[in-house]
Amino acid sequence: MNLRKMIFWNTPTPSEPLAETTPLVVPGPTEPKPHDAISNVVQLPDRTLLSQPAGLEAALESPELPPPAANQSAGLMDTPELKDFFADNYFGLGRHNGSNYRTQEALMQGKQSLVSRFQNTLAQLVEQRQAKVDRLRNTQLQTEGLCATTTAQLDMACKRIERDMAVLRDQIEQAADGKGWILEALNRYQIGFGKGLREAVDFELLGN
């Protein structure tokens, strides 16, 4: 077979109709549907100055939120006098007394001493607040009739302080029965007293 026959082997003759061939279609990039396009887009927050209220920009960038304004007014337990009272080592005091005195009477006297100290501290706080209420009431009388808003604010301040005084007086009464805020300090003292007593007795037994 010569080369000419190989080249024209499949060449149709002019009398034969050309076979219809299906054109080869190369798939192109498909356009995303409107729904898919929206779902794949990351929506960034609008950070323009006009779209955000004043002060919101700093809150978004800061990992910690500012403390609420209500925390500015410290509670009664945060007063320096009470913080100093509860900061003492009552366990160590009880342990010392237990190892030296070792009697039930000594335990009761030590606890009563703590109660009296606590009551005196609360009474001092009540006196301080009563003096402040007296000053505010005096100012309220002087401004009465001049500015209704100022008078109302002074009255609210006095009532708030008087509520604190009522709480302090209630704690004074509960402390007499070993209840209320003083209970934790009394428990620590009693646990320390018992530990000191046992350690002292064990030392004497081992020494003999």
Image (tube, helix red, strand yellow):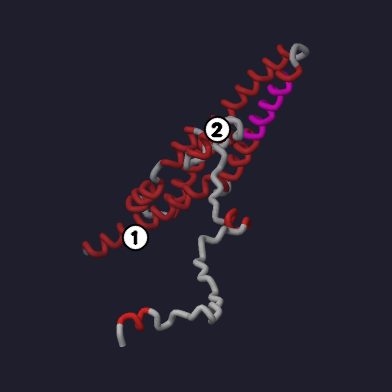
Does the magenta run of residues contain 156? yes
Reading the image, the residue beneath label 2 is: 72
Q: Amino acid at mark 2?
A: Gln
Pair 2/1: label in front = 2
Magenta residues span 151-164
- Which tag, 2 or 1, sits closer to the chain's start? 2
For the stretch drawn in magenta, the main secondary structure is helix
- The residue depicted at 26 percent of the width and 60 percent of the height is 203
- The residue depicted at 52 percent of the width and 39 percent of the height is 60
Answer whether residue 75 is visible to the viewer in this image. no
Label disc, if present, on residue 198 of the rendered structure:
1
Answer whether residue 64 is visible to the viewer in this image. yes
Residue 125, horizontal then vertical, whole percent: 55, 31
Tell me the quadrant of the picture where the C terminus can be found.
bottom left
Q: Amino acid at mark 1?
A: Arg
Tell me the quadrant of the picture where the N terminus can be found.
bottom left
Residue 46, horizontal then vertical, whole percent: 57, 39
